[in-house]
Image (cartoon, grey):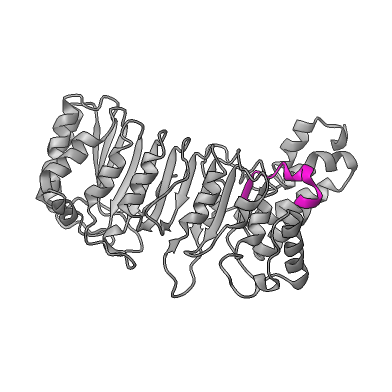
Amino acid sequence: MSSITHLPVELIRHICSFLRPNCIPGQHPYPCRECTRKLPGCNSWDRGQIDTSHLSQTCNRLRDVVQPLLFLCCSDNGNHQVRRLTRLLRTLTSRPDLAQHLQYLMFRDLEHLSPSDSKYIQSTTTNLGLAPVPDSWNTDGDPEYRLLPLQLVLAHTPNLRYLRIPLDYDWQLNLLPQTPHFSLPQLRSLEVTHYYISGDRFDISLSAVETIVTAAPNLESLSLPSPNASTFSAPLANLKRLDLQANNSISPELLTAFVSAAPKLEAVSLHWDALGDAYEDCEDRRVTDAWDALALGRSTLRVVYLDVRDDTEEAWRRGNGRARVDGFLSGFFPAEIREVTLWGLDGVEMMGAVKRFARVVAVGRYPRLKSVVLGARERSDRGGFDEWNNAGEWRGVEEELKGEFAKGGVRFEVRWTGEWWRGLD
């Protein structure tokens, strides 16, 4: 039997794939998200990395083949993220050949570094030809330096394809624009998580997002909590997926800016708390503001998840009532739309609008539409699970709607139990 050291390179790599969970994405657009959901297998990532590392140390041939696999993905599963990130930086600066292999970086935790690590970060900054950072950068909580180790890693990872980082409302990424030749041409997906501190706001620094997006001209997927701005100047020429995470308070102006800047946008998820944001005057916001923004992308959009905070019918009514509802259901969707799901539609106006939508479908307005789902209000930490004020009235027209949609070859379904908001998968 041949020794493993004599096997073809591709076969050795295939064997290594069994040593750790398959967190590198195949069909899933968000690699390693399963680790944050604590699904089976995520806790074996660190153990798999250790086993792979041991294998790489057995001989020179396996070192050359296996070591790059260790740096393909740096997962945030486990503790001491900043320390691990600093160790990663030490390797990337000393082994640029391995730095070329890092494609997936997930980072979510923050803590103070040891004095030696802190000084190493300072020296690495000056070695890049940048202005020195103060000795207190790691102790005073200055938002300018909270992500300094991460920025240094990004400056050494030109082939990064996926990035997940934490942001708060005042954190900055001022170092990266000053870094010579900083670019992320391979980055396809950016996911931002909110780093919540007790008593904190619930939004994130959009300027930090712009810094990364500007350096990533081929970005295709962007996932954000509530951004704290109303304008966005970075290009989104190749963006296809925009995921505005649960309980988002994005302004209509910013939503419009996103859609306008993304000529290839295919999917949008918006879980909108704009009508009840704690930090903004939202009295002049309407559900139709979201519709007007999304309508700018109707020629390319294929998937739209839109949920608006409580009082949906009242919010629509403020937007000129029935005409605006009808326009959304019957006039917004592109001809290629395949699935439509409507959550928690309360009120007579909503029922009439869905009936008119069914008649439009019946005459062939949407020839590729396959299913329409009507469901109870989605579940989230807003509370009010499974609320559907006039569910009885909808039961009375369920068969009528099934028949009307069937004329257009469309399956109509009513789900009487609420489901958790998922956003784009």
Residue 260 quadrant: top left
- In percent of the image, x 71 and y 42: which residue is there? 101
Residue 180 drawn at (x, y percent): 68, 47
**Residue 359 visible in the shown view:** yes
> Does the stretch in magenta take in 262?
no
The residue positioned 65% from the left and 75% from the top of the image is: 139
Q: Is residue 38 visible?
A: no
Q: Position of residue 4 (x, y in %)?
A: 84, 37
Left or right: 185 in relation to 345: right
How many labels, in total?
Answer: 0
Quarter occupied by residue 335: top left
Taking the image as shown, residue 44 lies to the left or right of residue 330, namely right
Quadrant position of the C terminus in the picture: top left
> Which of the two residues, 391 or 344, is positioned nearer the viewer here?
344
Q: Position of residue 137 (x, y in %)?
A: 66, 70
Q: Is residue 357 above or below residue 277?
A: above
Q: Is residue 389 above or below residue 295?
A: below
| Picture residue at 25% right of the left edge, 33% below the top | 411
Residues in magenta, as a range? 92-105
For this rendering, which residue is in front, 38 or 285? 285
**Does the segment drawn in magenta span residue 104?**
yes
Q: Is residue 89 left or right of residue 359?
A: right
Q: Nearer the viewer, residue 152 or 37?
A: 152
Task: Locate the N terminus and report the quarter of the image it occupies.
Answer: top right
Residue 12, how many percent across, how many down?
78, 36
Q: Residue at x 32, y 68 (%)?
A: 278
